[in-house]
Image (tube, helix red, strand yellow):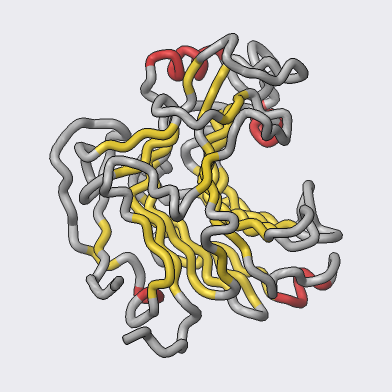
Amino acid sequence: MFARKFLVSASAALLAAHPAQADHHPISASAEARTLVFADEFDDGALDRSKWNVVGPEFWVNNEQQAYLDSPETIRFADDIEGAEGGVLVLRPVYKPGVDTRKDRKADFISGRINSQGKFDFTYGRAEARIKLPDATGVWPAWWLLGNGKWPETGEIDIMEYVGEKDWIGVAMHGPGYSGETPLVNKYFFPEGQDVTGWHVYAVEWTKDSIEFEIDGQVIYRVTRPMVEFYGEWRFDTPQHLILNFAVGGIYPLKTNGIKQPYVGVPEETVDQIKTGEIAMLVDWVRVYAPAGDKPAE
């Protein structure tokens, strides 16, 4: 059912309303002749709830400054985004004081977070997503994998984390003995003329003995089993599910920019950007492939 050949394209403006244009570069050599086990092209104009769950306001971690909400305001779709072929998932924060139902948080922002837990997970293989990010200090969108048990015992693989400095993104792994302030982390700085506001394919290649992080087919960081076992047990032999989310502020942005007002990790200029509706994480597609060497499905 996933027989068609997938292509990618490139772009510049985040929310420019222009007809989609493709430049017909293959996503990566690593994905050629692989069995596609999961895909969402976001072409239907609505979230496929057979593939995705939506996280609600009860969830809160890392002193993030938003409440997640299942709403057309926070989880949207567009089909007129330059550089994207077909539809695009739009996760965006919205300034909405008074909506948060948690009295211990009282967040002034709402935003979107989806995951595939209980609907799709996998062990070993390749996961990739084509994503475009905004230039806004203190935002915290991410694309990642998470084990189905108690954190961090079943592992976490952060394929892309972004805290609003547009020249770099972070990747990381978490598990028992190497969580939180993990030693297994890396920053990738884009070459001159590129940054997060262009379309990029963020991917991970996961095997039983190593995990490689890639951007646009280029390996940017490799973690091996011995590297992990220096700090704790390797916990990457069990299924993990997919997560896409757009957080606002919180501990990682704070540790990067030191901003405490008007919100933790978020300056006033970003608040103003959010109020205009121009801030969003665009996701062209998500695809997961079986491990290299597995016989393609007929």
**Where residue 144 appears, x then y in whole percent?**
57, 53
Which residue corresponds to the image point at 13% horizontal and 40% vertical from the top-left? 19
Which residue corresponds to the image point at 64% horizontal and 23% vertical from the top-left? 65
Name above or below for residue 104 compared with residue 44. Answer: above
Name above or below for residue 183 compared with residue 224. Answer: above
**Where residue 262 appears, x then y in whole percent?**
64, 11
Q: How many marks?
A: 0
The quadrant holding residue 295 is bottom left
Q: Quadrant of the N terminus?
A: bottom left
**Where residue 4 appears, x then y in whole percent?**
23, 71
Name above or below for residue 46 compared with residue 177. Answer: above
From the viewer's side, name the closer residue of 140 and 4: 4
Position of 149 with respect to 269 (left or right) is right
Which residue corresponds to the image point at 74% horizontal and 62% vertical from the top-left? 154
- Residue 112 in sight: yes
From the viewer's side, name the closer residue of 214 and 37: 37
Which residue corresponds to the image point at 21% horizontal and 51% vertical from the top-left? 85
Position of 282 with respect to 184 (left or right) is left
- Residue 255 in sight: no
Residue farthest front in this picture? 50
**Where residue 5 appears, x then y in whole percent?**
24, 71
From the viewer's side, name the closer residue of 175 and 115: 115
Q: Quadrant of the C terminus?
A: bottom left
